[in-house]
Amino acid sequence: MKGMSVMSLRLLQRLRPTAVLTLALTLFLTLFLGFGTRADAAPDAAPRAATPVGVNGKVRVCGTKLCNASGTPIQLRGMSTHGTQWYAQCVTDGSLDALAGDWNGDILRVSTYVQEGGYETDPARFTDLASRIVDQATARGLYVIVDWHQLTPGDPNANTARARTFFTEMARRHKDKVNVLWEIANEPNGVSWPRIKSYAETIIPVVRAQDPDGVVLVGTRAWSSLGVSDGADETEVVNNPVKADNIMYTFHFYAASHKAEYLNTLSRAADRIPMFVTEFGTQNYAGEGANDFAQSQRYIDLMAQKKISWTNWNYSDDNRSGAVFKSGTCARGQWTGTSVLKEAGVWIRERIRSGGF
C-alpha cells in the first residue's frame, strides 16, 4: 500500500504467511469497510477517519450541482467565521480541530470584511490572516470559501480595485490547493443585477488567471436573496446569467425572518442554476433574537434533498444568538462538546454531524 513505512514492511517480512493474511484482512476492513458515510452516522457519532477533501478531491460544478472529482453530486456542510477583524481569536488550531473532528464539518467560510475596520484598513495584514486560516483549514482536510465580505457599500463595484488586489494575491498563494472556493461578493445590496453581473465578469478572470479550475461563488441581488428582498425573484439571474463556467450563485437566509417566499425561491432556483447557501441563521436577519428551528429545518431538508451546500453564520462567541459559542469561549479555548455552545450552536452542530457528503 502507498505510504507504508519501512518499519511496517520489515514487520510484515517477519510474520508467517497466515499472520500476514490476517493483518491484511484487518487493514482492508478498517480502511475500506470502516469508513461508512456521514449519512448513516448518528448525531453523537465518533469523528470520521477520512477527511472531506480526502474523500471528494477537487470539486467542480456539473449541471446545477456541486460535484466531487468523480463527478458525483455532493453537499458540503460547515460554518462561516465572523469578521476576522473582530473574532480572529475564534479561529485557532483548537477551534478548527473541533470543527473538523468533533463537529465532522466539511467546509469553513473565511469572512474578510472589506470595510467596517477590515481589509481596507490594512490590506497586507488581512490578506495574511485569511491566508493563514486557509492553510489551517487545509491541513485538516476541510474545504475553504474565501469570502470577500463586502456589505457597506452594497455595490461591489465600489471595491473592484481592492478585490483585484485581494483575489490576485490569495489565488496566487493557494492556486495549487484543491479545496479552495472563491466568494467574490458577499451580499450585494442597493444595486441592480446587471451591475452585479458586470462586477462578477470583471473579477472572475482575476481568479481564473491564477486558479483556472476553482469554483467561484457569485452574490445575488438584495443581500444574496436572489432579489426577493427587493421584490424580485430568481428569474433575473436565470434569464441573464454570468458569462463564466464553473460558477455558483449564493443565497442567504435567516429563518426567523425569511419564510415561505424565500424558501420557495431557493427551491425553484436550485432546479435551474447552481446554488450555494454561503450564509444562514436560525434567527432573524440580524443574526439575533429567538431561534426558529422549525423553519430552519424546512430549509435544511430542502438543501439536503437538492444537495445545496451550506455554511452557517457564525463560528464565534459574539453576544448575538447566531454566534454558536457562549460568550468567553474563544478566550478560554475550550471548543468541543455542547457545554460551550448556545442553543443554536447545539442545533447546528447536530445537523452538521448527521449529514452526508
Image (cartoon, grey):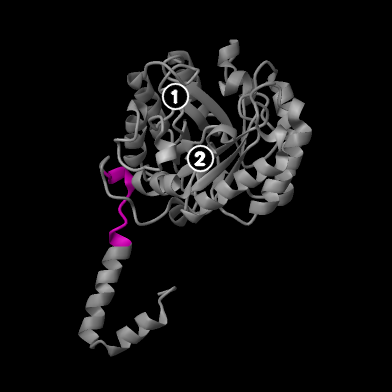
> Number of labelled discs?
2
**Lateral position of residue 190 relative to residue 253, left or right:** right
Residue 89 is marked as 2
Whole-percent x, y for residue 324 in the image:
40, 31
What is the residue that sits farthest to the top in this orientation?
Answer: 231
Q: Residue 317: in sight, yes or no?
A: yes
Question: Neighbour class for label 2 at 10 Å: few (<14), some, many (≥20)?
Answer: some
Q: Which residues are magenta?
A: 32-41
Q: Secondary structure at mark 2?
A: helix
Identify the residue position indicated by label 1 in the image.
Answer: 319
Residue 309 is at least partly visible in this image: no
Spot occupied by residue 244 in the image (x, y as percentages of width and height): 69, 38
For the N terminus, the quadrant is bottom left
- Quadrant, the C terminus: top left
Picture layout, residue 109 above or below residue 253: below
- Give the image location of residue 102, x and y in percent: 34, 46
In-image side of 25 versus 268 (left or right): left
